[in-house]
Image (cartoon, grey):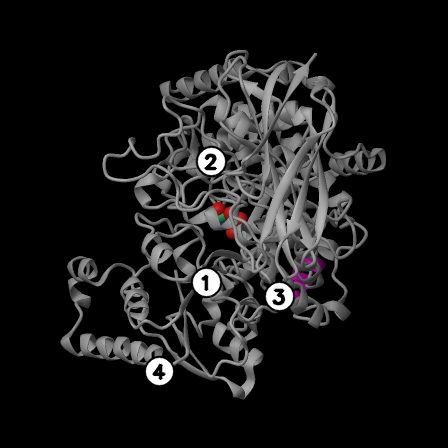
Amino acid sequence: MGMRRVMATVSVCLVAVLAASPAQQRAAAVAPSLPNDPAATKFVDDLMKKMTMEERLGQMEQIAWSGRERQANEGHVRKGEVGSFLNITDAATIARLQHFAVDESRLHIPIIFGFDVIHGFRTIYPIPLAMASSWDPAMVTASQAMAAKEASSVGINWTFAPMADIARDPRWGRIMEGAGEDPFLGAAIAAAQVKGFQGDKIGEAGRILACAKHFAGYGAADGGRDYDSSNISDEQLWNVYLPPFHAAVQAGAGSVMSAYEDLNGVPATGNKWLLHDVLRSTWGFNGFVVSDWDAVKNLQTHGLAASPEDAAARAATAGVDMEMTSHTYRDTLAAGLKDGSITMAAIDTAVRDILMIKYRLGLFDHPYADPAHYTSEILTPEQHAAARLAANRSAILLRNEGGLLPLKKTIGSIALIGPMVDSASDIMGSWSLAGLPQDSVTVLQGLKNKLGPSVTINYTKGVTIDRKQPSIFDEQFPDQKMTLETKQVRDAEFTKAIDMVKRSDVAVLVLGEAHNMSGERASRETLNLPGEQEQLLEAAVATGKPVALVLLNGRPLDILWASQHVPAILEAWYPGSEGGNAVADLLFGDANPGGKLTVTWPRTVGQVPTYYAQNLTQIPDDMTGRYWDGLSSPLYVFGYGLSYSTFTVDDLKTDAASVKTTGTIQVSVDLHNTSGVTGDDVVQIYTHQQAGSASRPRRELKGFQRVHLNAGETRTVTIPLKVSDLGFWSPANHSWAVEPGTFDLWAGDSSAATLHAGFTVTR
Ligand code: NOJ
């Protein structure tokens, strides 16, 4: 055993000892996350008795289909040596490969086909960060159920979603793929997605297997740089980063993906503490674990494994059942068995985990999609309607001075300006791999659909989105130095846009980031509006015309100037295939924005990471004296969002001033719609533990409800607060407990809620 390997083993053990909770020590008593199924167990046991080593390792193999190695891959399938493919979206190819596996392989074991159905398959829904902004888990469930219906219709059985990673740094491009910064909301949204993809039970018709990813800590990459190491204290790991995964597992997620990154010195894909002690022993997870793309092989790149064989043995021993793409299992585990680096028991455990899920999915009985559904379930009117509803419910109104929005359909003309106004690929957002631009409605088209010929729409791009600011771009890419001619064309386009603003009644600027600026490998070192969008916006406002800003983006951006000078700002995120229609609905009041931020919106990039659930510190409310050159308060707080309605919240009550650790408190407030417009608000409750074995965040979300109220309506909203949700993993005791004591309670419609009460928790 090399020195590195010894060190790594020692550090894994050390972490395990440090973090071992009583729950872990009681591991054997933990209930399985999926119900025991004696028929499945018998079927799989009998099957495994017949399997050769090649067939076993085949089940642990997931191949990325590109078509290039078609013959070789088909040969592997016919020999029963492929457990899974990813990235096939074509029904005929899926069916052909499945027939090879089922009809021609010796043991007829079906393949499980995986694909990143992250926010839709062919019909694209809003990006996950947007859907979370709806604070509407039921809508999230419904949307992912629709996505599952489309994907399963072509034979896809498995999605690599939900991404349950907490993200507190908007520089990280994959913040768009999660639910934001908060573990409580993140848990609710992760569970809602699992329910949408899988239904009540794995194997329901028209559903697909969920995969909670990226286990774990991937969202805490140093500097927000995708794939970088995460250094997370045990306290933060247990209390912030793990809860959404635990919720996904409790909701019955049949698979989990091990993350790419190095977590506290032990890469997640070789981290036995994470994949075995936490996931299986503590949480009772009994689905299967797939690695992320090439992550097994990359244990060597990380400097954990000495060779591909060592990487395979470490990942399989740690608890990675299926290897995505890098083939080290197929190529080396048999040799590893001979030289003792891997045990037969570890291989059998992996194969059993995978086959049990294939059985639960019903693949042995129904391996094929129904050809009648190949096209009939795709891009249906129901899909479009659901995508539009989701986009309407996901948007956030950040500012609306003087009630500029909603616009009146009777206006004469609109200047519709911006590089993405008519971009069908940008409106879909990243992770819309099977979505086609021609199936998407751009903002230009959406406004035309809404307004018809009676309103003149003056459209131009104004600017383009460059990879960098032009000046820096010139220095870094001298070959592409802007020619004088290019500059003149650009200037003319800019001037044309501003002229359009001048001669229109109102201007709508659609700005943000091109879709490929967020997502995987798309971190940013600034949060600026890229290119010359900021200058365009400032010039438009300088005309004196009313300007509404619509943002298409996947992360909070630096909009400090806009927040002070642009009267209306609508955060539409990447709203998906129906995005243009939804933006039109929202701009013209056919939909009323009701979304709320699930990430704290910083003033500048220098504030990140910033999040509402910070611990109280020296002079906690001093927002001016911490940075020499700026405020430390965010631009918009977590949970914030406006509406065309106005709401007030009052009369906070609890049904008990004191409650036992096992109890529940009913928290109620009166919510008033004080306007003449029907709309939605989100009631949120936050708590703070005043003293205990460790300091606790100044506020933590512990309950929420999106409420629809008619104009002038008042409703008493009651939210149950489960005292078990006040429990936390104490870094002092290395264990999870609800600690008796005094708690603050706030209720309102953002994390800045001011209605306050208190209660005590007793044993
Ligand atoms: C890599 C990504 O990190 C992961 O989220 C995705 O599911 C896989 N590639 C498969 O595409």
Q: Which amino acid, by three-letter code, is at mark 4?
A: Arg
For the residue labelled by badge 3, is the local secondary structure a helix, a strand or a loop?
helix
Q: Nearer the viewer, mark 2 or mark 3?
A: 2
Question: Which quadrant does the C terminus fall into?
Answer: top right
* Residue beneath the point at 44% across and 60% down: 401
Q: Which mark is residue 612?
A: 2
Residue type at mark 3: give it. Arg
Alpha carbons under labels 2 and 3: distance apart: 30 Å
The label shown at residue 503 is: 4
Q: Is residue 178 visible?
A: yes
What span is colored magenta in the figure? 89-99
Which marked residue is nearer to the observer: mark 1 or mark 4? 1
The answer to whether residue 93 shows anywhere in this view is no
The numbered mark at residue 154 is none
The amino acid sitting under disc 1 is Gly
| Mark 2 and mark 4: Cα distance apart in space | 43 Å
**Number of callouts:** 4
Residue at horizontal 49 percent and vertical 72 percent from the top: 443
